[in-house]
Image (tube, grey):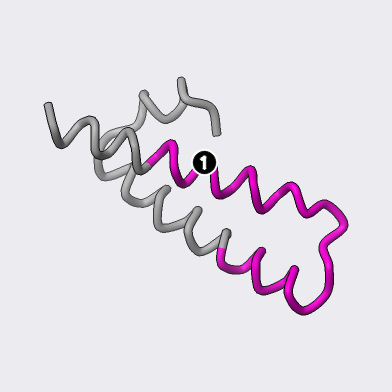
Amino acid sequence: MKQSEIKELSVEGLKEKLAEYKKQHADLKMAHFVTPLENPLQIRKVRRTVARIATELTKRELQ
């Protein structure tokens, strides 16, 4: 998810996406632990998306 897409979402939308991506990250980590993923860089991509969304939420709360 790109930063421009994140900025367009509402606060509720951000919270929903954050929960969705956190679950996806946990699932990917578990799947990688059991059997190595074909593309382990997916984990990094999802983790960074979680950080982008969390940063945008924090930024909006401080405004």
Residue depicted at x 57% and y 60%: 24
The magenta segment: 26-53
Residue depicted at x 66% and y 73%: 30
Q: Amino acid at mark 1?
A: Thr
Residue depicted at x 53% and y 27%: 2
47 left or right of 16? right
Badge 1: residue crowd in 10 Å (few <14, some 14–19, many ≥20): many
Residue 62 higher or lower than 43, as above or below: above
| Picture coordinates of residue 60, whole percent (x, y) | 20, 31
Residue depicted at x 51% and y 41%: 49
Query: What is the chief secondary structure element of the magenta stretch?
Result: helix
Quadrant occupied by the N terminus: top right
User: Between residues 23 and 54, which one lies in front from this camera angle?
Assistant: 54
Q: Residue furthest top?
A: 4
| Picture coordinates of residue 61, whole percent (x, y) | 15, 36
Quadrant occupied by the C terminus: top left
| Picture coordinates of residue 31, whole percent (x, y) | 72, 72
7 left or right of 20? left
The image quarter containing residue 58 is: top left
Residue 27 higher or lower than 40, as above or below: below
Q: Residue furthest bottom?
A: 34
Count of labels shown? 1
| Picture coordinates of residue 38, whole percent (x, y) | 87, 57
17 left or right of 39? left
Tell me the SS state at disc 1: helix
Q: Which residue is mark 1?
A: 49
Q: Is residue 37 magenta?
A: yes
